[in-house]
Image (spheres, rainbow, N blue to C red):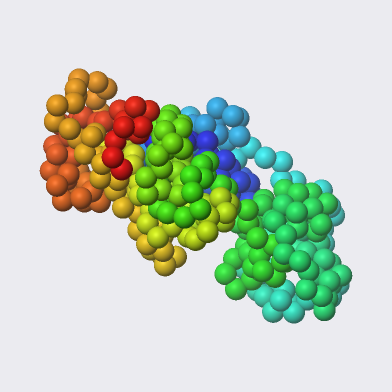
Amino acid sequence: MTPATTLAAALQARLLAHAIDTGRTRASLTTLLTMQAAIEAHAATRPGARQRLSNAIDELVKQEAAETPRSGQLWDHAALPPLPRWVVIIADISGKVPPIDMSTTTWMPIISRWIGTWLRTCKPPTALRAALQQINSWLLEHLGEQPAILAREERSLSIFNDEKTLARIEPSSIFAPGRLKPQDLAYERPVAPLRAARLAAAGDLLIVENQATFDSAWRALRQSRGPFAAIAFGNGWEAAQAEPVIALADHLQLRATPERIVYAGDLDIDGLDIPQTLAANLNALGFPEPQPFHAAYSTMLDPSRDRTGKRNAPVPEELARQAVKWLQDDQRDRAHRLLVNGQRVAQEVLDRNWWATTEL
């Protein structure tokens, strides 16, 4: 399932940038959906995206980081769950510096070519103008040099004496297409690593959706690793993002990038959507798609398995067909029947004994 905290934190950061960039603390539903699409990429088009956005907004409200309309008439009821037509981000964006005359500054060429248009069309508030001046001052200080590439927060500290400023303004209009890029300031965004265990110097990469399965799998596979060089804990939708998956080979110091990525998750809508979203994101970057872990899904779809546990709402026929198309041919019909009957299989049925005794 989607960790709401992941989307909520990213959404809060973009809402803060929106407030700094525009001077307005209210963001429309269209803005929220656009932000979700930028954060989740392909995942934002998958079933469950609306529910994830609702969960993230609820979390921000509970944290007293945002407010939603009290009147039900100000909510969008076109689909379930209902979503607010706007939210107000709770933040102090008052300028802490006096108004700035941008015409008195000597601007670096990579800024001077667009700053006039930026001032006229974006009408940036004082805080964002001040940030751009500080960036320009840093660039002037290093004119003719090639500063070493640093992590974003490290570069932010050197420019602003505040390690978090760059992350706050990165979604703003300063970094819109055609303006500044991370390369201009010699920094890279940190890639949040997936929790992973190295089993060998080379081989396939196995990703599992849930923490307990990861724990049992790596303990068992230490003794008999099968074809795998490493196993990663996907933490639900975090695994749908391509960058952390691609970075695993370097993080674990594998001899070579795994030629094959194998995935196993819950047999429900989210569990089947995650690897398909990861496949789309990997394809967009020129990397091979993950493959379903056939042995795992065969066990989960064993017709003798007890289906009397937790039930979900029945999945519509067409939606179920789309969800199971990622599985191999001999597993699709059984998985389809499972979904349309409102059943699911948690991958925790692949317990430690299964990982230790199954031929992989």
Residue 68 visible in the picture: no
Seen from the viewer's position, the closer of residues 67 and 12 is 12
Taking the spot 49% from the left edge, 57% from the top edge, the residue there is 246
Q: Position of residue 298 (x, y in %)?
A: 21, 39
Relative vertical location of residue 55 with respect to residue 181 in this rendering, above or below:
above
In the picture as drawn, the residue positioned furthest to the top comes out as 308
Q: Position of residue 360 (x, y in %)?
A: 31, 43
Q: Quadrant of residue 294?
A: top left
Q: Is residue 245 left or right of residue 89?
A: left
Relative vertical location of residue 103 with respect to residue 328 in this rendering, above or below:
below
In the picture as drawn, the residue positioned furthest to the front comes out as 223
Seen from the viewer's position, the closer of residues 334 and 214 is 214
Give the quadrant of the N terminus: top left
Taking the spot 44% from the left edge, 65% from the top edge, the residue there is 285
Q: Is residue 328 left or right of residue 136?
A: left
Seen from the viewer's position, the closer of residues 281 and 114 is 281
Q: Quadrant of residue 127?
A: bottom right
Taking the spot 56% from the left edge, 47% from the top edge, the residue there is 193
Residue 138 visible in the picture: yes
Taking the spot 70% from the left edge, 56% from the top edge, the residue there is 151
Q: How many marks?
A: 0
Q: Position of residue 230 (x, y in %)?
A: 46, 47
Q: Position of residue 308 (x, y in %)?
A: 20, 20
